[in-house]
Image (cartoon, rainbow, N blue to C red):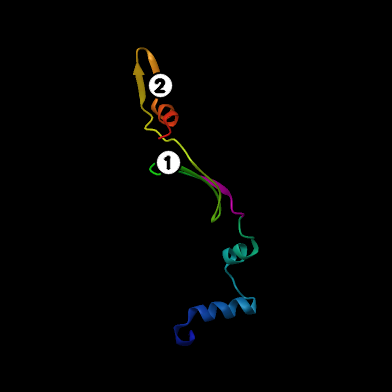
Amino acid sequence: MVFNDNVELLDELHRRAGVETDSLRRLIASKPEPAVRAYIVVSIEDHRLWYRHGDSVLYSSAVATGSGKILESNGSVTPLALRNSARGS
């Protein structure tokens, strides 16, 4: 019987006594935390790019984002993303 239905207390006492039988808990406890990796975030709505590492922003920049549509005029093909970035919008 667990005192006052305190299962967490019973688990803690098992861990302290070294009689824990859960192999997954032992495995997780023996592994270090994984390293935080850097990643890139692009906001199409805000036209911004962030290079982040964990909670830190290492680099931020305005970027051109487009719809992926192609503008064709007199046989010339221009991706709208390139056209927008040339205008600075």
Residue 47 in the image: state x and y as whole percent.
42, 41
84 or 56: nearer the viewer: 84
As shown in the figure, which amino acid type bears the numbered disc 1?
Answer: His
The image shows residue 79 at horizontal and vertical percentages of: 41, 25
Snapshot quadrant of residue 43: top left
| Label 1 neighbour load within 10 Å: few <14, some 14-19, many 20+ | some
Picture residue at 58% right of the left edge, 50% below the top: 37
Q: Label 2: state its secondary structure.
A: strand
Whether residues under marks 2 and 1 lie with C-beta atoms below 8 angstroms apart, the answer is no
Q: Which structural element holds mark 1?
A: loop
Residue at screen point 61% across, 56% down: 34
> Mark 2: few, some, or many residues within 10 Å (few <14, many ≥20)?
few
Identified by mark 2, the residue type is: Thr
Q: Is residue 36 magenta?
A: yes
Residue 50 x/y as whole percent: 51, 46
Report whether 7 appears left or right of 33: left
Count of numbered circles in the view: 2
Query: Which region of the structure is painted magenta?
Result: 35-40
Residue matched to label 1: 47
State the residue lying farthest toward the top. Answer: 75
Residue position marked by numbered label 2 in the rendering: 78
The percent coordinates of residue 9 (x first, y second) are 53, 81
Q: Tag 1 or tag 2, which sits nearer the N-term?
A: 1
Q: CA distance from mark 2 to mark 1?
A: 20 Å
